[in-house]
Amino acid sequence: EAAALFSDSLSSPVRIQIVKALYREGKSFTDLSKMTGLRGGNLLFHLEKLQKSGMILQRGERGEYQITCRGYEVLNAVAELLEKLHG
């Protein structure tokens, strides 16, 4: 399960950027598009990967994207691991 999470959900710098951006507050598709420089289907591809892995969710059909508890836990675990490796 961990390997699948890292190889799929967090294998892309764009997906890591999205999860980090949602860490403090929810963001709209437009906000995420401006932040990543991706539009339409390209951004949707990354958002769907993160949703399928349970890292983020969308409030309503056109609502904000938000990080989930699992997303917080995974991001914090990655930060801890990086700190141990580099600290």
Image: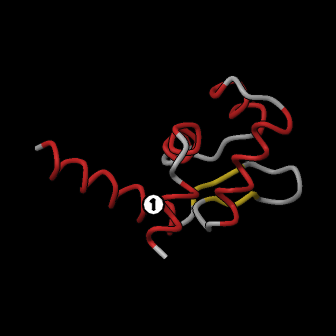
Give the answer, above or below, for where 20 lies relative to 81: above
Q: Give the secondary structure at mark 1.
A: helix
Give the answer, above or below, for where 29 lies relative to 73: above
Residue 8 placed where, x, y %? 58, 58
Tell me the residue at 24%/55% (across/down). Answer: 80
Residue 35 placed where, x, y %? 63, 26
Residue 42 is at least partly visible in this image: yes
**Outermost residue toward the right?**
61
Residue 78 left/right relative to 48: left
Residue 79 left/right relative to 83: right
Residue that label 1 marks? 72
Residue 60 placed where, x, y %? 84, 60
Residue 69 is at least partly visible in this image: no
Tell me the residue at 64%/28% (across/down). Answer: 36
Tell me the residue at 73%/30% (across/down). Answer: 33
Residue nearer the viewer, 3 or 77:
3
Residue 7 left/right relative to 44: left
